[in-house]
């Protein structure tokens, strides 16, 4: 980070491009009641969604900024984290020249997006206890390494990365450290969000898809310095977060107690399931988890996966992932669903 300079990282075409300017960008006072809007070729008959949505999602950002104690200009919203991650590639990684580093076993989208964007994905395996191998990661870095993706808590392993390893990477690497915190609300560890002022190369992604219970509306969040956010803003599709999503997110965010109680219930169920798993004969290892899922090692993952399907329960077989031979990933469901899972496992 010592020599971090965003100007060395933003792609030249992004630096020089002129962003699309939408009608709603040029006249922002959308809520002015007595104005007549004849600027965007919309259908004038009101039905709740006949107007284009707010391209800057100001209302949703205002709520998130307050909740997370950041400024609204440190937030970018996307059509799921997937869009946010794709924007990071497109802003900072030059196809066929640049590379990124990811740490398998981890979330599959970093690899998919690097393929799609024609960016080399340098994979540095996690250690056997699923922590970043910091020395090896730094050895894999070269002048064209733009982003290191850290998923913490990590999917599918469930653990989070140590403060020391993340801090070392933030300090020694002069590109972006993207921390994917999709599962942070299930962890007792603090988010890295409080550090975005301290580290200009820190980018954090979160999502409403997991703890917030809104996978269906597709709302991903990126927190970073205002400088980074302004680059992403420049290249994002103008109306990337639709009106229904914005409304539904606001509604959900207005009831933080409900979200908190659902998270507490999922964590309670997780702890209960962890205890039951200890006594299941074919379970060989239960990995520590800070997420809403549990990774277990079993005698024969394919066999146990098929048996559960026959009992009407679908889990995720992770046996083909590196370091994950014969592992299964179980998402925490409702109390009733978990009971059925426990009965199925015992029989
Ligand atoms: C589920 C998940 C996401 C969520 O992606 P969305 O596009 O926001 O639904 C992001 N990162 C990881 C590691 C995940 O497991």
Image (cartoon, rainbow, N blue to C red):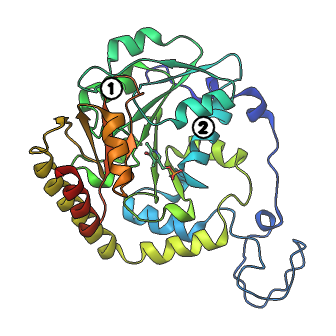
Q: Residue at x 42, y 56 (%)?
A: 70
Is residue 250 shown above or below 270?
Answer: below
Q: Quadrant of the N terminus?
A: top left
Q: Which residue is mark 2?
A: 88
Q: Residue at x 14, y 57 (%)?
A: 272
Q: Residue at x 41, y 57 (%)?
A: 210
Q: Would residue 16 appear left or right of 326 to someone viewing this image? A: right
Q: Residue at x 38, y 35 (%)?
A: 318
Q: Residue 183: tell me if it is visible.
A: no
| Foreground pick, 141 / 1 | 141
Regarding mark 1 in the picture, which secondary structure is present there?
Answer: loop
Q: Which residue is mark 1?
A: 325
For residue 252, what is the image quadrant?
A: bottom left
For residue 77, what is the image quadrant?
A: bottom right
Is residue 15 shown above or below 344?
Answer: above
Residue 54 is situated, as x and y percent measured from the top left of the image, at 68, 68
For residue 150, what is the image quadrant?
A: top left
């Amino acid at each position: 980070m010592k020599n971090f300079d965003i100007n060395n990282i933003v792609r030249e075409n992004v630096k020089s491009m002129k962003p699309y300017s939408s009608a709603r960008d040029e006249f922002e006072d959308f809520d002015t009641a007595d104005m007549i809007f004849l600027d965007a070729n919309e259908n004038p008959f009101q039905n709740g969604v006949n107007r284009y949505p707010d391209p800057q999602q100001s209302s949703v950002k205002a709520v998130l900024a307050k909740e997370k104690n950041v400024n609204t200009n440190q937030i970018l919203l996307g059509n799921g984290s997937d869009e946010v991650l794709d924007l990071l590639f497109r802003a900072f990684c030059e196809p066929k020249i640049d590379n990124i580093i990811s740490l398998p076993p981890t979330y599959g989208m970093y690899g998919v997006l690097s393929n799609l964007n024609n960016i080399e994905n340098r994979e540095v395996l996690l250690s056997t206890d699923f922590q970043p191998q910091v020395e090896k990661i730094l050895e894999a870095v070269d002048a064209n390494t733009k982003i290191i993706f850290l998923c913490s808590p990590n999917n599918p392993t469930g653990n989070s990365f140590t403060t020391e390893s993340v801090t070392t990477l933030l300090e020694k690497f002069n590109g972006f450290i993207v921390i994917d915190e999709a599962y942070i609300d299930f962890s007792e560890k603090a988010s890295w969000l409080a550090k975005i002022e301290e580290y200009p190369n820190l980018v954090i992604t979160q999502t409403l898809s997991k703890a917030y219970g809104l996978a269906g509306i597709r709302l991903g969040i990126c927190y970073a310095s205002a400088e980074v956010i302004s680059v992403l803003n420049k290249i994002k599709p103008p109306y990337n977060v639709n009106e229904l999503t914005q409304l539904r997110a606001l509604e959900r965010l207005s009831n933080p107690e409900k979200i908190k109680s659902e998270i507490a219930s999922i964590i309670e169920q997780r702890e209960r399931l962890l205890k039951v798993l200890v006594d299941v004969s074919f379970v060989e290892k239960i990995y520590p988890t800070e997420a809403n899922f549990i990774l277990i090692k079993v005698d024969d993952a394919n066999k146990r996966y098929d048996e559960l399907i026959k009992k009407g329960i679908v889990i995720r077989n992770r046996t083909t992932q590196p370091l994950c031979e014969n592992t299964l990933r179980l998402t925490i469901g409702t109390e009733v669903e978990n009971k059925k899972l426990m009965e199925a496992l015992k029989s």
